[in-house]
Amino acid sequence: MSVPAPFYAPAMVAARAVSGGWAATRAAAATPNPALDGVLLLHVPPPPPVALNLLVPALTARCAKPANAPAPGAPHPAQILLLYGSLRVLGAGADASGAAVVNLDASAGTVRPPVPSAQAEPTGLTVLCRGLTSAALAEILLGCRPLPPRQPLYTLATLPAEHTQAVKDELRDHAPLPDDVFYDGRSYVSFDGTRSELHPGIDVALAKLLGEMNDGVRKANAFADEAAANADADGKRYLATVA
C-alpha cells in the first residue's frame, strides 16, 4: 500500500506550485473579512438586579444600526450585533429577593421580549459587538438599576395647588379672625374697608405647610442618597469582576 508523501515533501511542494489553485485558495482565506472588522466577542457576569423598563431601551439603543458607516481607519461606533444570556431583573415574577431571572436575546436592530428563565441563577451576557468593551457593557447594565431620585425643596411658589387650597379652606372654616376682620362669604373685610381673598393667618399657615413638606423631602433625599451610595459601592464591586 502506498503512503501519501508528507505535506512538505519535494514532490508535494512541486505539485502545489504547478497547480496554483491551492495557493490562491490559501491567500483568499488569509484575507480579512471586512464584515468582521472590529468585531469582538465579550462576556459580562450578571450585575446587581436591573429594571426591565430601563434595560430594554438601553439595549435597543445599542443594537440600532449606525446611521453612517465609519470612514476608513476610523473606529466603529458602538453596536451590539448579537446578545444572549440571562440577568436578574426587578418586576413581575419576582422571588423573595424582589427579583426574577429572565433570558435575553437580541440581534442588530432587534431586542426580543425577555422571557422567564428556568435557571435559578443568571448566567450574565455573551455579546458580539463593535466599539464596546466589557467594562462599557457593564456600565450600561449598571445604569439600568432603578434608584430613587432626589427632589428639590419646595418654595411658596412651588407648593402644590391642592395643598395650598386645603390650607385656605381650613383657615376659612376653622381659624379664628381678628376682632376687626370679618368674612362676608367671598372675602375677608377689615373695619377700615380693606378686602382680601386671603385669611389674615395665611402667611403663618403656608410657612408651616412649607416646613412640613420640606421635612418630607429631606427624608426622601436622605434615603435617595443612601441608596445611591450603596449602588455606587455595589457597582464598584461588580466592575472589579469584569475582565
Image (cartoon, rainbow, N blue to C red):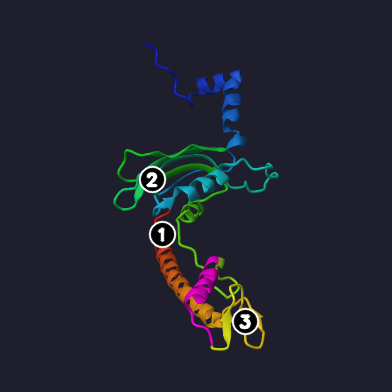
Kindly identify which residue carries mark 1.
240
As helix, strand or loop, the secondary structure at mark 2 comes to loop
Kindly identify which residue carries mark 2.
92
Q: Which residues are magenta?
A: 162-178
Q: Nearer the viewer, residue 235 or 132?
A: 235
- Name which of mark 3 and mark 1 comes first in the sequence: 3
**Residue 7 image position (x, y, % from top left):** 47, 24
Q: Nearer the viewer, residue 26 or 66?
A: 66
Point out the image quarter for the N terminus. top left
Q: Within 10 Å of the Cα at label 3, are there few (<14), some (14-19), or many (20+) other Cα atoms?
A: some
Residue at mark 3 to residue at mark 2: CA–CA distance: 58 Å
The residue sitting at 53% across, 48% down in the picture is 58
Kindly identify which residue carries mark 3.
189
Q: Nearer the viewer, residue 96 or 125?
A: 96
Please say whether residue 153 is visible from this viewpoint. Answer: no
The residue sitting at 53% across, 78% down in the picture is 206
Residue at mark 3 to residue at mark 1: CA–CA distance: 70 Å
